[in-house]
Image (tube, rainbow, N blue to C red):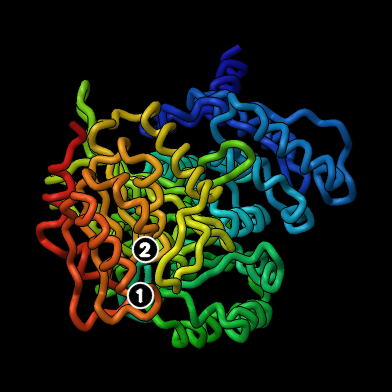
Amino acid sequence: MTNLFSYILSIFAFLHPQDKEITMKFPENIKNIGITSLSGIPNKERLDIGCERLKALGLNPIQATVEAPPQRYLAAPDAERIRQFHELLGNQDIDAIIMACGGYGSSRIVNSLNWELIRSRNIPIVGYSDVSGLHLAALKHGCRNHVHGPMVSAGIGAKLESAERKAAYEKTMQSLCNVLNGEKNLLPPDAKLTVMKPGKATGPLVPTNLSLLHDLIGTPSMPDLSGAILAIEDVNEAAYKIDRYLTKLKVSGHLARIRGLIYGAFTDTADEEFLPAVLEEFASQINGPVVSGLEFGHIFPTLSLPVGKEVTLDATTDTPTLTLAPISDYESCIYQAKGFTLGYRFLSPKTIEADKKYPLVVFLHGAGERGMDNHVQLVHVLPKFVQDDIREKFPCFVAAPQCPEGQQWVNTPWGLKQHDMPQTMSDSLAAVSGLIDDLLLDYPIDASRIYVMGISMGGYGTWDLVMRFPKRFAAAVPICGGADIKQAALIKDLPLWVFHGDSDTAVPTYRSQSMVAALKEAGGSPKYTEFPNCGHNAWGPAIETPELLPWLFSQQLK
């Protein structure tokens, strides 16, 4: 009986390691975990153990229904794996998905997935290895809430036959919880990174399996790595193959465009005596910092890393750091209505007090930031709002939608000296209007203090939006834009501060000058600043104008 009792206790400890589990807390908004495999066949025993451990963390694992058996080395035929994934995404009760396992198969189906469904759900999806193919394709589609982290049968369901293995499990799960909870420091206290090339860089973090990244080059699912901090790992790949993969990244131009490189674990590598020289060779060619020794990949414990969130890699000392950058405080969101999907980034006040409402700033970017990556629209103006002093002095919400490629905020050519306001809003600007309606319902926003500002194409959008809804906005800041001067009387009473450069050849300076003149003629009193010797980028000096933000946040609808 004693032996039986000891055996039962050992099984309980195997399923529910206790030492530090109390600190492993998922976010409060994550309770139901969807589980499926886009790739290989999970180990049934470890899958069951992983599910039990998720339950021990207070979570509710929900496995997709199975309607077809495995096919060769795949968890199911392609169509069935897609159906299972879509089933979980269609279940509105599911808060996150953790993949059952890796293997092979994601690259067979990523182009057949319902990306509108994936974007609209915008939930965390966790996995690594072959799941990297999904993560990379998701970046291409503007999904930035994925996590390169442990899977249910690989990591979460690992065997814990020793104290060392239990400690590895705890470290693995703590890292996953930290990422899901938005912890700023992405490295554990005992991280030991080696600086291969010193420097400091900020950009979206792209953690991935190197061979999966290589396989996507030249396909529709390959994301743009421009400005990225690339973190790579692999398993069972010979040194010459790693050389081949990195060479392909180099000759295709991707390595030249990244801002930093992180080498993770390269395990079970044939000819591993050549690997250090391979990694050193490519490190020397990176235009930014390079570090090695990051504890992520096909190892146990393994660190979790956010996919696509903006980070800062600081390798200027012997103790490198990897932290979320302030600009990552803009949450990655998706708005969907009437069949139109609009990615946007959303900043909240650092502290939201009960029974208090805050201003909303809507920012419309220029033509060069169009797309669906839900990142590039952050490049201009928006960094100002995450500065500590600005957030302290002017707590507010900021919404930054991204206009899809090939569309405009206002359907008119930009080089004209004048244009007639279109009878209807563009689909993109109509979506922005709908987004504002939704934000007012969902957040403590002061409806009397909604502001809009935009640059270039977004300057046109700013003018157009306030002319259509003159009673909605408390103030507007159109920068190097243009509008229909015949509609000036509609907004003569709206507080406006207009900016333009005197040497702008993209949008003629006359567009702002004529609009300001029309407003004054209609009885308005707009503020106008024209920067001398300034071309199209008037937004730079405009956002640094000391009086701008105090003026903006002092405006309120009467």
> Quadrant location of the N terminus?
top right
Q: Is residue 260 left or right of residue 223?
A: left
Which mark, residue 137? none
Q: Is residue 287 left or right of residue 535?
A: right
- Which residue is pictured at 72% across the width and 54% down the height? 110
- Which residue is pictured at 57% across the width and 82% down the height? 253
Is residue 159 visible to us here? Answer: no
User: Which picture quadrant has residue 463?
Assistant: bottom left
User: In the rendered view, would you say 363 is above or below 6?
Assistant: below
The foreground one among 514 and 85 is 514
Residue pointed to by mark 1: 508
Which mark, residue 482? 2
What amino acid type is highlighted by mark number 2?
Answer: Gly
- Which residue is pictured at 65% across the width and 53% down the height? 134
- Which residue is pictured at 49% across the width and 23% down the height? 58
Where residue 291 appears, as percent x and y from the top left, is 40, 73
> Quadrant location of the C terminus?
top left
User: Which picture quadrant has residue 520?
Assistant: bottom left
2 and 1 marks in contact (CB < 8 Å): yes
Where residue 408 appears, as percent x and y from the top left, is 51, 59
Q: Is residue 130 left or right of residue 400?
A: right
